[in-house]
Image (cartoon, grey):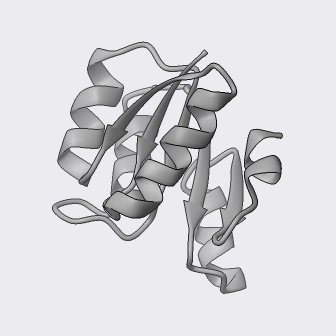
Amino acid sequence: MRILVIEDDARVASFIRRGLREEQYAVDVARDGEEALFLAQTNDYDLILLDLLLPKRGGLEVLRTLRAEHVTIPVLILTAKDEPRDKVSGLDAGADDYLVMPVRALELAA
């Protein structure tokens, strides 16, 4: 399984990548919205883990663009934004699920 992690915080991205690799997943990391779109549009991923607060293009913009282009890769929003309206916005934009950080490795792996 190949996963795209879209996260601008290097420490968080490293933590997620390390945990997923320990579970035998192939992991690519994008650090901003533009890089995320490029990678998602040019590679085959089984899952995208998407932060909402990104430089260059925000996570919701990335998600809406992918869905408008009929990219059907499952997207799990993984963010610190925990307000109910944020969750609703993410799900309405096309996310398949929404997790609030900090998240435990076991919960993320599930």
Query: Where 72 sits versus 33, above or below?
Result: above
Task: Tell me residue 48's x, y (percent).
Answer: 52, 37
For residue 74, say whether it is visible. Answer: no
Query: Where 25 sits versus 103, above or below?
Result: above
Q: Is 45 left, or right, of 84 in this rendering?
A: left
Task: Tell me residue 66's x, y (percent).
Answer: 39, 37
Q: Is 73 left, or right, of 59 in this rendering?
A: right
Numbered-mark total: 0
- Residue drawn at 66 percent across, 86 percent down: 83
Query: Where 89 sits versus 48, above or below?
Result: below
Q: Residue 35, located in which quarter of the rendered image?
A: top left
Task: Tell me residue 72's x, y (percent).
Answer: 55, 25
The quadrant in which the C terminus is found is: top right
Q: Is 14 left, or right, of 16 in this rendering?
A: left
Task: Tell me residue 95's x, y (percent).
Answer: 61, 49
- Residue drawn at 58 percent across, 20 percent down: 46
Q: Is 104 left, or right, of 22 in this rendering?
A: right
- Residue drawn at 37 percent across, 70 percent down: 53
Viewer-proximal residue among 67 and 33: 33
Viewer-proximal residue among 73 and 92: 73
